[in-house]
Amino acid sequence: MLYEKLDPGLKKMVDGYVGRLRVLSWKRRSDLVVEAARSFGEDLPPDKAPTAARGFITAVLERLEPEPMTDPYQASLYLASLDPEHRQAAEAYFAAHPELEAGLPEEEEPSF
């Protein structure tokens, strides 16, 4: 798990985000996590910034209680994870829901 490799300060920050995210919808979770993740790459070279952002997303997803994949925003967030199992679950969700191929409702998938 990526979370286990974080220093204590980053673990505390991730846990704080997770505590606030649990009560929110997947759309809102996705919006907040992607916005926070972007800040991880601000001081890094452009070739390293996306990996840092995806690492934050991965750590947050690892700390959230495992849930069945039921939402396109959830799947989109899982696609951004560095964890191959997260991405596989998201790809399976989108494969089972071809009507979502045109994109997520109301907005695009997260980008960094």
Image (cartoon, helix red, strand yellow):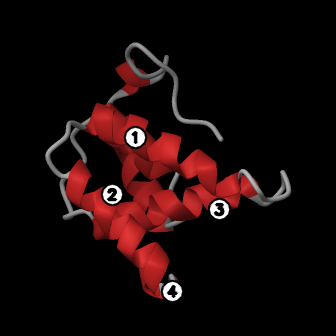
Mark on residue 52? Answer: 3
Towards the viewer: 48 or 43: 43
First in sequence: mark 2 vs mark 1: 2
| Quarter of the figure with residue 75 | top left
First in sequence: mark 4 vs mark 1: 4
SS class, disc 2: helix
User: How many residues crowd mark 1 within 10 Å: few (<14), some (14–19), many (20+)?
Assistant: some
| Residue at 26%, 36% in the rendered image | 71
User: How many residues crowd mark 4 within 10 Å: few (<14), some (14–19), many (20+)?
Assistant: few
SS class, disc 3: helix
Residue 69, relative to residue 58: is it above or below?
above
Q: Which residue does the numbered mark 2 point to in the structure image?
A: 17
Report, in whole angstroms, how far the alpha carbon at label 3 lies from the one at label 2. 16 Å
* Residue 39: image location, x then y, percent: 61, 50
Q: Which residue does the numbered mark 1 point to in the structure image?
A: 32
| Residue at 31%, 32% in the rendered image | 27
